[in-house]
Amino acid sequence: MKRINIIKSILLTSTIVLGVSCTNLDEEVLDGVVVSNEAGGSINTGSLLTSAYEGLRGFETQGQMFALDEMSGDALVGPTRGGDWDDNATWRQIHVHTWAPDHNEVRNAWNALLSQVYNCNIVIENGSGSEVAQARFLRAFYYYNVIDLFGQVPYREAGSALTLDPKVWNRTEATEFVISELEAIIGSLPARSAGDASFANTDAAHFLLAKLYLNKAVFEAADAAGPYTFAAADMTKVVSHVDAINSALSVDYWDNFKPTNNTAPEILFSSKNVQGGAGGGIQFHWRMGMHYNQTPDGWNGFAIVAEYYNNFNPNDRRIKNSDPAIITTFGNNVGMQIGQMYKPGGTVALKDRNGNPLFYTSAITLITSGATLETAGIRMQKYIPDAANVGTPDNDFVFMRYSDALMMKAEAIARGGSGTNDVAKLATIVSRSGQVGVFPTTLEGIYKERGKELWLEGWRRNDMVRFGHFLEQRELKPYVSDKKYVLFPIPADALFNANLAQNPGY
């Protein structure tokens, strides 16, 4: 009998959902739905593969992996606004590094990632051909995020009983496994299709391998907090994988984030959305910060930290897209918003709900109240709102871009890798933002440029750790964090698995 458990409880998600194989098992079904092939039924691996792709939308929301990757860094903050947005200090704890093993978004991220590993495993065990190659790529991507965030990776050997605790790879073992998986399947993946990067493809595999080799020193360090020793051979691997990517930069930076961004040549891997249909969580990327009275309206929540905003030239096109069509439709620039906000057309000033000018200020505190409740903090829109359908938009969610790959290559060369930078392409990254100058070649310069190019794209924590800046004090966290916060804790409920041990310090 083949069984599929649709995991509902935290306990079962933490212990059962990790199975590599679920074939030929006769254990009691503890939770969920049984699909049996005894009466001619079969596991629909195509449907499960679709579910594994749709699981990528878990990265789109304001919580889970997005919150852990971005709010734990120096760019994004989720202040409590009077009686709103406190959520038991959920967002503040992430930003100031005071989370614990019972933190809800830590648990949600763990469960979301490993639930999709489970879907991939069923396809790998029961599917064939292209389905299996795609599932192995997706599993590698989900595992990469578990390695990065949590360090330990539960897994189940094929054919093992679901009643047994999953085994656990340490960070080094998991890293080597994912690298070997990607290297084994890269030749079986198709080339990236023009106009649709939402399927596993060779360019995406080269990108993920480059990301793994770039972070290998971090992932395999004796102490997760460093120091890190970047091997020249690993850095050269980064260069070779980036060189193998067949891509070009988009002429306009914002082509990568518009409702029809599936046509952007720069996007190497994305999560597909359908206008008016399966829109995923893209709307969070304009609603979570915007005011109730703006177009589109928002939830008046998250903000950009002023210290981070000040790294940009205020006219950097990456944070200020003021194209006439944008102003006509929405009233204000897309990107980061500061100052007076306007109605569509850009001439009629908006007011907050108390009748005061809706004027965003850079000043923000973790707990905000009084007259600035609705106006404190710089707001952000990483994606151009889909005016035709703001609730279920057409924008695909971007995971991998060629500009990131080029910057990874520049960093790898600066860390001792062999290769030659694509000077003209790196110059385009700077020039298309409206800035004057050349792309930096020093490590600190590359770090700063990555912060400008990739803001709120899910890579900030990863970059800050690798460059040694994650634990440092900053504007709203005026202290150096304990080194334990380089990794998130294993959720308390997951420790029912006796093979898991809590990460050091928690």
Image: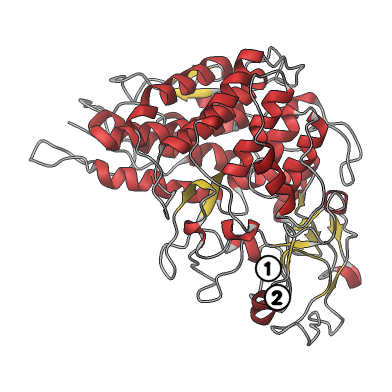
Residue at mark 2: 292
Task: Assess whether mark 1 and mark 2 are in contact (beta carbons under 8 angstroms).
Answer: yes
Q: Give the percent coordinates (x, y) of residue 304.
A: 79, 55
What label does residue 152 carry, if any? none
**Is the residue 322 above or below the residue 368 in the image?**
below
Q: Earlier in the sequence, mark 2 or mark 1?
A: 2
Residue at mark 1: 299
Label 1 CA crowd tier, 10 Å (few <14, some 14–19, many 20+):
some
**Is the residue 282 above or below the residue 54 in the image?**
below
- Can see residue 97? no
Q: Quadrant of residue 129?
A: top left
Q: Give the percent coordinates (x, y) of residue 139.
A: 42, 33
- The residue under the point 85% across, 49% down is 311
Look at the numbered disc 2 and give the secondary structure of its residue.
Answer: loop
Q: Quadrant of the N terminus?
A: top left
Q: Quadrant of the C terminus?
A: top right
In-front residue for pair 284/437: 437
Q: Alpha carbon of mark 2 to alpha carbon of mark 1: how far?
A: 6 Å
- The residue under the point 39% across, 28% down is 186
